[in-house]
């Protein structure tokens, strides 16, 4: 990688299960906030977001989500990768942090949940797979086996 190049890649993974208008807004917001950070999207249907890897129709489940994530990790060329999901809006500061080391998973913890058919919102406790950053090689070594 050239000196001064990007240090991280955003990995956007989706089951293409959201309303297309909603997901288009999520993607537009992501592009706006990502700035110069490259985006690799891994989807079950072709989408126009960064470099797209279309895996075809698969059953939505955690195992297939992790397979999609692994494909994105292997396609990235930066030292770090950061996740983004099709049903999440991210604040600009989510993209500001790059860890000091490549061998630890870092979770963004300022997460808030809003459900379409439930009133109000609340802060999520624990971590979210859709809000992580880690060294790419280390992440591959943890998922691939």
Image (cartoon, rainbow, N blue to C red):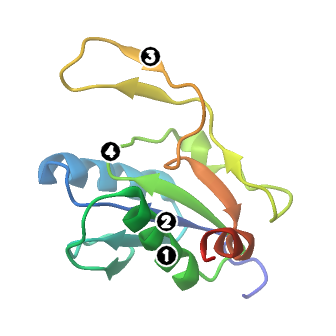
The residue at 68%/68% (across/down) is: 142
Residue at the farthest bottom position:
2
Which quadrant of the figure contains the C terminus?
bottom right
Kindly report the distance in space between the C-alpha atoms of the residues bearing marks 4 and 2. Answer: 14 Å
The residue at 79%/83% (across/down) is: 3
Q: Which residue is mark 2?
A: 11
- CB atoms at circles 1 and 2 under 8 Å apart? yes
> Mark 1 or mark 2: which comes first in sequence?
2
Q: In the figure, 48 relative to 87: above or below?
A: below
- Horizontal arrangement in the rendering, residue 143 relative to residue 19 (left or right): right
Q: Which secondary structure lies at badge 3? A: strand
> Mark 3 or mark 1: which comes first in sequence?
1
Q: Which residue is mark 1?
A: 72
Within 10 angstroms of label 2, few (less than 14), some, or many (20 or more) residues?
many
Kindly report the distance in space between the C-alpha atoms of the residues bearing marks 3 and 4. Answer: 16 Å
Q: Which residue is mark 3?
A: 122
Which quadrant of the figure contains the N terminus?
bottom right
Kindly report the distance in space between the C-alpha atoms of the residues bearing marks 3 and 2. Answer: 26 Å
Kindly report the distance in space between the C-alpha atoms of the residues bearing marks 3 and 1. Answer: 30 Å
- CB atoms at circles 4 and 2 under 8 Å apart? no
- CB atoms at circles 3 and 1 under 8 Å apart? no
The residue at 34%/78% (across/down) is: 52
The residue at 25%/11% (across/down) is: 119
Within 10 angstroms of label 4, few (less than 14), some, or many (20 or more) residues?
some
Kindly report the distance in space between the C-alpha atoms of the residues bearing marks 1 and 2. Answer: 6 Å
Q: For residue 46, which quarter of the picture?
A: bottom left
- Residue 87, numbered label: 4
């Amino acid at each position: 990688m050239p000196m001064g190049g990007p240090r991280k890649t955003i990995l956007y993974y989706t089951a293409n299960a959201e309303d297309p208008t909603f997901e288009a807004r999520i993607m537009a917001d992501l592009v706006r906030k990502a700035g110069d950070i490259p985006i690799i999207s891994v989807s079950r249907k072709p989408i126009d977001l960064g470099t797209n890897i279309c895996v075809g129709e698969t059953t939505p489940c955690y195992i297939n989500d992790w397979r999609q994530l692994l494909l994105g990790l292997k396609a990235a060329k930066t030292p770090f990768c950061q996740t983004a999901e099709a049903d999440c809006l991210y604040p600009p500061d989510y993209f500001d942090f790059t860890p000091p080391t490549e061998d630890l998973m870092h979770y963004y913890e300022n997460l808030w949940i809003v459900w379409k058919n439930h009133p109000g919102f609340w802060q999520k406790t624990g971590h979210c797979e859709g809000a992580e950053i880690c060294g790419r090689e280390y992440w591959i070594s943890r998922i691939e086996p």
